[in-house]
Image (tube, grey):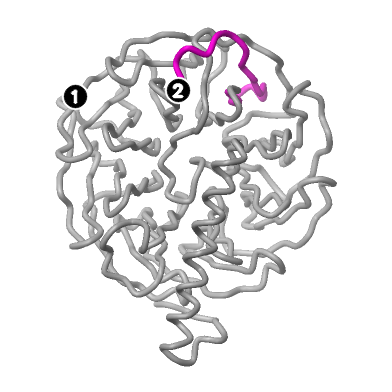
Amino acid sequence: MNDTHISNADTNRGYRFSAFILSAILILNTQSRADAGDWVSFRGNPQLTGVAAGFFPDNPHLLWTFEAGEGIESTAAIAAGTVYVGALDGNLYAINLESGSLKWKYSASDEIKSSPAVFRKTVYFGDEMGVFHAVDAETGQQRWIFQTDGGIISSANFAGDSVLFGSYDQYLYSVSAETGALIWKFETEGYVHGTPTVVDVRSSGSLPYPNDVVVTTGCDGYLRVINVLNGEENNKIPLGDYVAASPAVLKTRAFVGTFGNQVLGVDLNHAEILWNYEPAKGGFPFYASAAVTNDAVIVGGRDKRIHALKPQTGEPLWIYPTKARVDSSPVIIGNRVLFGTVGGVIYALNINTGEPVWQFVTGSSIVASPCVAGGNLVIGSDDGVLYCFGGGTRSNE
């Protein structure tokens, strides 16, 4: 069932013109984020590929720590020299990237597991009471809130002037980034846990859709392709199992792990599963989202391993045993793969060999994913400590 609310779309000509403008805005937004060297959302870009620009030092040092009131499960965002992170104490914290000192904090309605996203000097995130918040990035003042009927763990993504997110009320939402007014909502058949992916159909290759699309996965076991302008479903692909991860999209392919012990490569052109990878050590879900380049799909599993796969076939390139569950979604930067484990260890692996090149023991479980920008790694832990690493040499650019 689809409840659609949208204006200025009475003719096909209007749709085509809107699609052209939206594609241009998407390209400009993506370029500005990459040029700024910030990490403004859960996976770093609208396609959720988990790839960071710039460099990461070979031997990073601990620069500072910040203590929140309770545990940190959400991924931090970095924009214009400020780190934004939500915590289970219900606060969104704005922290100076250079010093680790608190700038301001904003109190939400409940625990924050949704990773904050920064867009046009506003921070967007949801909380466990189902409230979606828009907060001024400079002052911490509330701009608007939007109420859903279920907890929000999904992080925000953006298309033109709209912000998109999922809720445990089983809806995917598109609301105005400026005012919070509902544009459309799409009803699924299960919780929408993951973050929606936004795909520009012109730059992606040969996707057969008239307008840019939202690619979303959820607990109903489907991957859906939805028109970003009006919320109409273009395609629905059964994945066979419950999905908590967010889909990473590279050109015309989506990559996502399931709770059925599989990682899937999905052809968005033909709406079919191209390959599925199932480790021999079976029965363990893939909760973390994948990081994707042209050469590798990197994903962590609850089988206590990191898997590197060929994007074309799903064949394994290497597997690294971590000795602890991996719910932290990996980030690729240069020839490094960065992630944390519930055993409390932060790793950097060589992306070509899977060999560890650096690690740091925190002493507390990590389910949050890395945030990487400007040579800094920021990540939170379950005891409420936010870590910032940087410095060192930069030979691995």
Q: Which amino acid, mark 1?
A: Lys
Q: Is residue 139 left or right of residue 291?
A: right
Give coordinates of residue 234: x percent, y percent: 31, 72
Residue behind mark 2:
338
Residue at x-position 29% and y-position 45%: 255
The answer to which image quadrant residue 235 occupies is bottom left
Q: Is residue 139 above or below residue 189?
A: above
Which residue is nearer to you in this view: 61 or 127?
Answer: 61
The answer to which image quadrant residue 89 occupies is top right
Give coordinates of residue 288: x percent, y percent: 40, 35
Q: Which amino acid, mark 2?
A: Leu
State the quadrant of the N terminus.
bottom left
Residue 192: mark: none
Q: Which residues are magenta?
A: 377-397
The answer, for residue 184, to whether it is visible in the render is: yes
Cα separation, mark 1 vs mark 2, equals: 23 Å
Characterize the local packing of mark 1: few (<14), some (14-19) or many (20 or more) Cα atoms within 10 angstroms. few
Residue at x-position 51% and y-position 15%: 344
Give coordinates of residue 171: x percent, y percent: 48, 65
